Amino acid sequence: MTYNLLKGKKGIIFGALDEKSIAWKVAQHCVSEGAEIVLSNAPIALRMGEINKLADACKAPIFAADVTNSEDIDKLFIQTKEHFGGGVDFVLHSIGMSPNVRKSIHYTESNYDFMHKTMDISAMSLHRILQAAMKHDVINEWGSVVALTYIAAQRVFPDYNDMADAKALLEGITRSFGYHYGVKKRVRINTVSQSPTRTTAGSGVKGFDGFISYAEKMSPLGNATADQCADYVVSLFSDLTRMVTMQNLFHDGGFSFTGVTPEVIEQMEK
Ligand SMILES: NC(=O)c1ccc[n+]([C@@H]2O[C@H](COP(=O)([O-])OP(=O)(O)OC[C@H]3O[C@@H](n4cnc5c(N)ncnc54)[C@H](O)[C@@H]3O)[C@@H](O)[C@H]2O)c1
């Protein structure tokens, strides 16, 4: 069911890699709710070619940008303004990568060049995007920015590695920039803290399969899917949530506030 919640709105979606990506679902849902979008991802991800299918289905152009490169982001915003003949109403940041996770390096032995890269791609990129957006005045008044995060920013999940620190920084930037962009242009900025979800980035975390079933058993509503996440993000891009900003919003079926469940206790007693 669609509600035309984003009719007349325009947005940028960062991070759709393949059809499992959370950003892929958000792009589809935004378009079915009446929005026009542009898609962006790193040049290396675009070479995979999968995104072309999404672009065709959404009638969206694809603009390459490595989010660790300010010039790329400047160029993307100039192209976006040209394409729409003006600014945008929403931006999705759905980007994460840790070379330490990729190479299975234990947290206590983190490689610092890799850790810099993790922070740069997964957290500072939000700052870089917002700074460039302000400079190019690309986000319209009452615009909405959403970044995807994970509860490892608040509680320890040992195998989430340095991504946990990146998510803590991402949520910090959301609050700090949310203040400044709110004052300057009434732009709101929030993070959505999503249940573990089977995607390329998600599956890179050690022990992910066991973890996903643990989270399922620990959530009164079960794990939230990528499609359900997209629904929630659409609501945050819509005019129905105009006074919500600088928040970390859990979208996790109740996992974050559940202490224990009979299903988990039963498992322990086996
Ligand atoms: N999958 C999960 O379990 C889960 C749970 C909570 C939060 N998240 C977050 O959701 C977001 C999206 O991840 P996903 O699970 O859909 O996986 P995904 O692998 O589909 O998406 C990650 C995206 O980041 C992009 N990216 C990486 N480096 C980049 C760079 N330098 N420049 C531009 N883009 C770059 C990738 O190309 C990819 O499109 C991430 O922030 C992730 O941490 C995921």
Image (cartoon, helix red, strand yellow):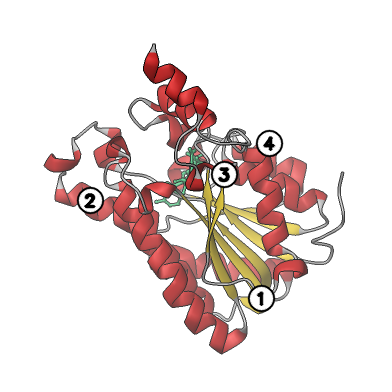
Residue at numbered disc 4: 53
Residue topped by disc 1: 243
Task: Locate residue 88, reporting x and y percent.
Answer: 67, 70
Q: Earlier in the sequence, mark 3 or mark 1?
A: 1
Q: Nearer the viewer, residue 67 or 259?
A: 259
Question: Considering the numbered disc 1 on the image, is that residue within a helix, a strand or a loop?
Answer: loop
User: Can residue 121 be seen at all in this image of the molecule?
Assistant: no
77 lies left or right of 85:
left
> In the rendered view, does 108 fall on the left or right side of 192?
left
**Residue kind at label 1, given as amino acid type:** Met
Going from the N terminus, do you reach mark 1 or mark 4 first? 4
Q: Nearer the viewer, mark 2 or mark 1?
A: 1
**Residue 172 to residue 235: above or below:** below
Q: Residue at x 45, y 63 (%)?
A: 72
Say which residue label 3 marks. Answer: 254
Residue for badge 2? 115
